[in-house]
Amino acid sequence: MLSLVDLLARIGSGALTPESAFRLTLEAIAMREGEIGAFAHLDRDARPSGRGPLNGIAVGVKDIIDTAGMPTEMGSPIYAGWRPKADAPVVSALKRAGATVIGKTTTTAFASVDPTRTRNPHGLSHTPGGSSAGSAAAVGAGMVPLAVGTQTGGSVIRPAAYCGAAAIKPSFRLLPTVGVKCFAWTLDTVGLFAAGTADLALALELVSGRPMPLDPPARPRIGVVTQDFAGEPEPAAAAALERAALLLSRSGAEIWDVKPPSSFAAAWAAHGTIQDFEAKHALAWEYDHHRAEIAPLLGEALDKAQAIPAAAYDDARRLANRARRDARELFAELDAVVTYAAPGPAPEGYGSTGDSRYNRLWTLLGTPCVNVPGLVREGGLPVGVQVIAPFARDGVALALAHLLERAQAAS
Ligand SMILES: NC(=O)CC(=O)O
């Protein structure tokens, strides 16, 4: 994969120019995009910006995120050819730092669950996951050093795990969702994909304006959480979590097997009500005026969502708030938890983008999640874990994910 930190170091040392660094992306896209299909739109005229710390860095942006001068088509024929006037603020932040948007990465329709045409770089007959399929595949295939995605259920962490990319779903609202097509306003979170945790930290620091130091807490206390309420994982995911706990322990962490409070299971079960109730309002215009053009799985979900009463939504939000309170207590004793990033390796075939069952609780809690890829492999496919820190402790999530990544590399 193309490492952001490595590219910038080589530009800084003079081993690369911004132009030659940018050309590495162009060459990689020329080599792999034909079989991967990570981009909904490529800007063939894109060039380095000539300024800023990210000069020479090409970025992929998920196609539900507004970009001026490029189509933003939401993965749907309803928005075919749609060109926003302005960049979303997260795109403006990247451009202000000197990055170049090389293209729009594929998304499931409106960031829901209908598969895209994108293929998994580690197994072309496997899904890359979703909804941020193109961003995960573009980074995992080594085509771009940085890509932007979003998560409402598991759409950053799961595809990153399937495609062997590092990724962060930051704390809720750390990055603005202005200019991002809304699916569920209390869940949608903008996230980043990169080759490794140091690359993520640098990118998040530049985009969020907050320092993300990678030095971990001394003697970190880490809880291993299996989320039994979400069902059993595949053996490879269980093996990845066991390996992560062993590597973290060998790196000096205190490891605790943690049974989450009962409110977590209730909040996990309530995620769908919140998501689908909000989606029926967020996509009301598309549903009322273009129902026949809505992708099938999303259309079915929206049909059912019409019947969700506001009272059920309000009850679900109360359950979420209780779990957020309990999460604060859980994290009072822990620096982070580690759990499955996905139920297993990327599923064979393209009929599904996989299952967000191990991701959606943490999206609802708003806690920062970092995918550490490839703890184990099955059939050549990477299987990762996610490191989760308390709300607003994104730097700790990255630092402990970095500790695990380094331990994995040294093992
Ligand atoms: N947008 C989402 O997070 C949906 C998913 O997890 O597939």
Image (spheres, rainbow, N blue to C red):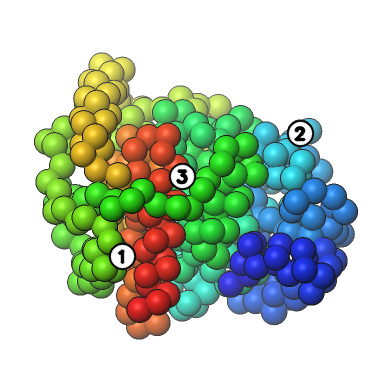
Question: Mark 3 belongs to which amino acid?
Answer: Gly
- Which circle marks residue 86 in the picture? 2
Judge by depth and name the residue closer to the eye, 318 or 338: 338
| Label 3 element class | helix
- Three-letter amino acid code of the residue under disc 1: Ser
Question: CB atoms at circles 3 and 1 under 8 Å apart?
Answer: no
Q: Are marks 3 and 2 in contact (CB under 8 Å)?
A: no
Ligand 1 within 8 Å, label 1 CB: no
Question: In the image, 150: left or right of 187?
Answer: right
Instruction: Say what amino acid the circle numbered 2 marks.
Output: Ala
- How far apart marks 3 and 2 lie (CA) works out to 30 Å
| Residue 317 numbered tag | none
Question: Which comes sooner in the sequence, label 1 or label 2?
Answer: 2
Crowd around label 3: few <14 · some 14–19 · many ≥20 (10 Å): many
CA separation, marks 1 and 2?
Answer: 46 Å
Q: Which mark is residue 251?
A: 1
Residue at (49, 71) in percent of width and height: 120
